[in-house]
Image: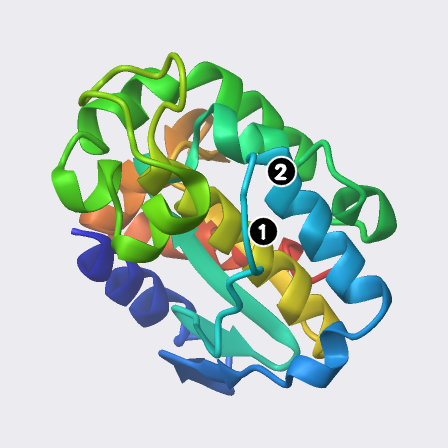
Amino acid sequence: MHLLKVQNLIQVISLEIEDIEIDFQLEVNGKYLEGKGEKLLDGIFQSLNGNGKLPLLERLKFDFKINRFLFLYDDEVHFNRYRLNTFKTDLYDTFSFQWLESYKRLCRTYERDCMKAGMQERIWNGPPIASKVFGKSEEFGDLSGNGSSGWKLNAYNDAQYDLLSRLHGYKMVRIPQYETLMIGGSLKKVDDLLRNPKEEHQKGIVNWLKRKME
């Protein structure tokens, strides 16, 4: 479903916006992290009670790129207490992100949705690196104690994307599935609009996306 919504969004905006690079990948240059960057990343790691060597992504994958703007569409599993913890670190004081305050609110509001979507083993426990650096997860659905190592890894990687994209000279634009926009005199959820975009809504969607690049 994520792929379908992103494809629909790209199809709509391509009518008016040029130079859209789909499935853009950014090779990470580790040298950009040296000094201040590594300190910021360590702050994120510590906010999630990580242990050991900092895991570093070698390649970042984005839904699409327009000029120096990188876009990701975020579904339910990106909104929970661990992601909220990362927003309290120095990274988000050092760099400004247009979507930051709304993401804080969404993390507080929609953790229940994350619980519904994030109970699968591959998400709750994550890959082996998750338990290695964040410890063993509690039982499925139990956020007490050590909670979910998979959710922590997701939050850490999301913050890595935010930091590394900025260090490489790009601006990160996150689109939450919960975002709403005013179209035709009423508020509509982006998620609903992108499931089956109607022709009369296309101009509003294009203008909404353009505002994110101002």
Circle number at residue 117: none
Q: Is residue 55 left or right of residue 88?
A: left
x 79%, y 75%: residue: 34
Q: In which quadrant will I find the C terminus?
A: bottom right
Q: Could one spot residue 162 in this view of the protein? A: yes
Figure check: 53 above or below 69: above
Query: Residue 207 location in percent, x, y?
Result: 55, 55
Residue drawn at 32 percent across, 41 percent down? 150
The number of discs equals: 2
Labels 2 and 1: the sequence-earlier one: 2
Q: What's the residue type where badge 1 is placed?
A: Ala
Front residue of 214 and 42: 42
Residue 86, numbered label: 2
Which residue is farthest front? 52
Q: Nearer the viewer, residue 28 or 182?
A: 28
- Tell me where residue 43 appears, x and y as whole percent: 72, 45
Q: Which residue is mark 1?
A: 159
Q: Position of residue 9 (x, y in %)?
A: 34, 61
Residue 167 as seen in the image, left or right of residue 45? right
Work out how far the residue at label 2 is from the one at label 1, CA to CA, in angstroms: 7 Å
- Label 1: few (<14), some (14–19) or many (≥20) C-alpha neighbours in 10 Å: many
